[in-house]
Image (cartoon, rainbow, N blue to C red):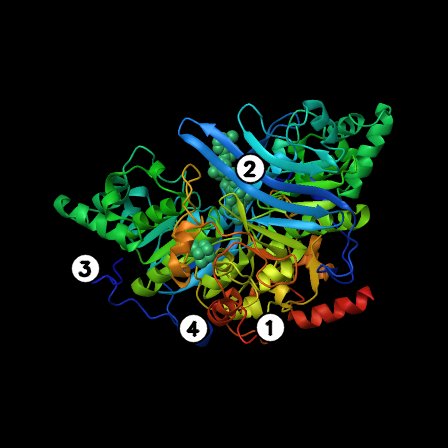
Amino acid sequence: MTTGSETQDMLQPAQSGPNIAQRRGREGKKVGEQILKVTDLTVQFPTEDGLVQAVNGLNYDLQMGQTLAIVGESGSGKSVSSMAVMGLHDTRRARIGGSIMLDGQEIVGASAQTIRRMRSATAAMIFQDPQSSLHPFLRVGWQIAEAYRAHHKVSKSVAMKRSVEMLDRVGIPNPARRAKQYPHEFSGGMRQRAMIALGLVNDPKLLIADEPTTALDVTVQAQILDLLNDLQDEFGSAIVLITHDLAVVAEVADEVLVMYAGRAVEHGTATEVLAQPRHPYTWGLLSSVPSISATGSSLRPVRGLPPSLLNLPTGCSFHPRCDFMERVPGGRCIKELPELIPPESQSDRVTRCHLAEPADIFRDEIAPSLDGSEGRSHE
Amino acid sequence: MSDQLGTQDSDRYREAAPVVHPDSDPDRKPMLVVKDLVKYFPVREYTGLFPTTLQIRAVDGVSFDVAPGETLGLVGESGCGKTTTGRLITRLLEPTAGSIQFQGREIGHLKERQLRSMRRDLQIIFQDPYGSLNPRYTVGNIIGTPLQVHNLLPKNKRKARVQELLELVGLNPEHINRYPNEFSGGQRQRIGIARALAVEPKLIIADEPVSALDVSIQAQVMNLLEKLRKELGLAFIFVAHDLGVVRHFCDRVAVMYLGKVVELGSRESIYGAPQHPYTQALLSAAPDLNVVRGAVPEERIRLVGDVPSPINPPSGCRFRTRCWKAQDICAQEEPALIPRNDSGELHTIACHFAEPKTSIVADAAEVTV
Ligand SMILES: Nc1ncnc2c1ncn2[C@@H]1O[C@H](COP(=O)(O)OP(=O)(O)O)[C@@H](O)[C@H]1O
Ligand SMILES: Nc1ncnc2c1ncn2[C@@H]1O[C@H](COP(=O)(O)OP(=O)(O)O)[C@@H](O)[C@H]1O
Ligand code: SF4
Ligand SMILES: [Mg+2]
Ligand SMILES: [Mg+2]
């Protein structure tokens, strides 16, 4: 709950008009060198019940200045794969295979020292719950300053100055006073900002944001997403945005990777994947989201539940929930894991499905019933 | 799954009113009338010499009504008083002031014992599918208890009824002896729904019933609620912060801010022609999938800062500290929730400067040039 003193920060003088933000135009963004390349990544956890196959061969790369959204239901391996990129798994408990090249450095099998050096300075991760990053009993400004000093040989006062600058940069009012406060004295949105300040204090080239706005109200979510966008424009960093919210993806991502049972099932630009999806799972996700801008038709969600990762289905992992497998001859969906292949000859756009004519099926059978898409053509 | 309810013992639902378009029927007869509802929570503060008692004004003068078969959505940012409103109506809380009339009877201050008959008609579904079911009870007990409490069925018929309810919400009737932890989140939410339906209520307060669920499971549960609403003619008060979910499910929508309803109207008027600046800001802040189809306007109103404290809310209009239209009158005089600008009898707005959005965005574009 907000305190009385916090209210004072909020009392803004009346403005002459609303504060208008442009929704992001993604065109014309500068794309820089490759910062991350993930190849055949697997992550498994041996447990009492058996081997949890959380990530089962994941491939993607990311350039500076780009935002990649990773979407999928809970348990699809979004967090586990991203924590592998950050070297956050306990290697005694997690079996990691494949390769993760982060800024030219192999992370899989790297020493603890290498990983410490990369973390924060090369790549930083922020979470849904700021409590996981901000220590409750230490002053916010001090925590950010210490994170800076871990990678820069500077005096405490220089580091504190940097810390206050960062708080200011992420839009926290009265940053010098706020720096002296504890996390619990911040509102939820401000804690999220403080965590972003902490994540960005060493100018990382890659920021992984794991459901950063899931717990926030839409107005605060919009502020945080605007902030990430502004910071990216300013510093040119790469962002991996983990989310289950397709509308957020539509607003902020350049590229989307749809994950199912630890694998990519579809990957391409946000417009390609969301406006012309080719995989039955993506169709199901899109048909589950009620539109805010149209009063529409019925929801047609994916039926059933995600599979157990202890015992993955044969063939296509999605086949037990798929309504289209009868259209693939010879029972291939049950027998054969589809490759991640381009559905059309051009583009980097890939889909993992045996269906021969996904574009036609989407146009004729899925698109007409999507909320809010009536009367619009799907080229 | 059984698609109709012909097997039910009573015909409580026979006379369920058809869903009417609320704006087109000013003669609608509400089953629930909430008037000037207030709930303050006292908190003690120990700053000075003596502890002082402050009041959290969680709900501070809220009025609306719900007709049979209608769904009213309550939206607004966390802390605006949605849950408290729902708990007041189901009388899990006693109001500080104001009245709650349910089916013609004032229930605001009834004693626990007197509440029983009303509880049968008015049920609640909670957000948290994990916390709201007793882990030590089987599903059969959880759903069967209300039948027992309300003495609805002789003991030997309860099991069949519970299985019928399980089937109705899309669960396997053979799982009647399982415990909540053996079910997924979406399935637990279905158990909560079956428990609410056991007593054949007329009005269900659903407090964020799908917020904790993944999108596809969320859509499965929404489809279930929709089916139940249609088949049983149930009325709903549907609390959610997801504006798409509310648009999909609700006939009418009340937008709350800091313990007050700031705008109330049909789905079409709230989403299509919102007039309160807060509603406009809230809607434009929500991310929209249709941007990839080029179907969404470019601008978005940015709200600055956080919601003020409910202990010491701003005078006059509570939104004024974040409002770009605020004038002196907004600090001096609280705007009444009334029809404005030909908004129609049932579209009410609490703003001194209410106006449809198109002109606001045009104004703003001028200002920012
Ligand atoms: N340390 C662990 N031990 C065993 N299983 C784990 C561990 N961490 C994650 N998992 C499992 O891995 C799967 C993927 O989890 P996660 O990546 O967190 O999913 P999400 O896509 O929701 O982020 C889940 O089924 C989860 O239970
Ligand atoms: N039992 C309680 N004691 C003290 N304050 C409460 C209690 N319940 C709710 N509040 C406060 O009342 C306000 C409204 O809360 P709530 O109705 O839960 O809002 P919402 O459901 O819209 O998020 C908040 O400021 C909250 O902190
Ligand atoms: S491969 Fe078969 S089962 Fe898998 S998504 Fe495609 S059609 Fe469905
Ligand atoms: Mg996760
Ligand atoms: Mg609530």
Q: CA distance from mark 2 to mark 1?
A: 37 Å
Q: CA distance from mark 3 to mark 1?
A: 49 Å
Label 1 element class:
loop
Tell me the number on the disc at residue A379: 1
Instruction: Check disc 3 and report the residue beneath it.
Output: B7
Q: Please report the residue visible at 42 percent of the width from the left and 75 percent of the height from the top.
A: B25
Residue A154, percent from left and from top: 86, 25
Residue B6, percent from left and from top: 20, 63
> How many badges with numbers are in the image?
4
Residue type, label 4: His
Q: Are marks 4 and 1 on the same chain?
A: no
Name the chain under label 3: B
Mark 3 and mark 4 lie on one chain; the one further toward the N terminus is 3
Q: CA distance from mark 4 to mark 1?
A: 36 Å
Residue type, label 2: Thr
In the picture, measured across the screen, residue B112 lies left or right of residue B94, that is left
Instruction: Check disc 2 and report the residue beneath it.
Output: A42
Q: Quadrant of the N terminus of chain A?
A: top right
Residue type, label 1: Glu
Q: CA distance from mark 3 to mark 4?
A: 30 Å
Label 4 element class:
loop
Q: Are marks 2 and 1 in contact (CB under 8 Å)?
A: no
Residue A248 found in image quarter: bottom right
Residue B224 found in image quarter: bottom left
Instruction: Check disc 4 and report the residue beneath it.
Output: B21
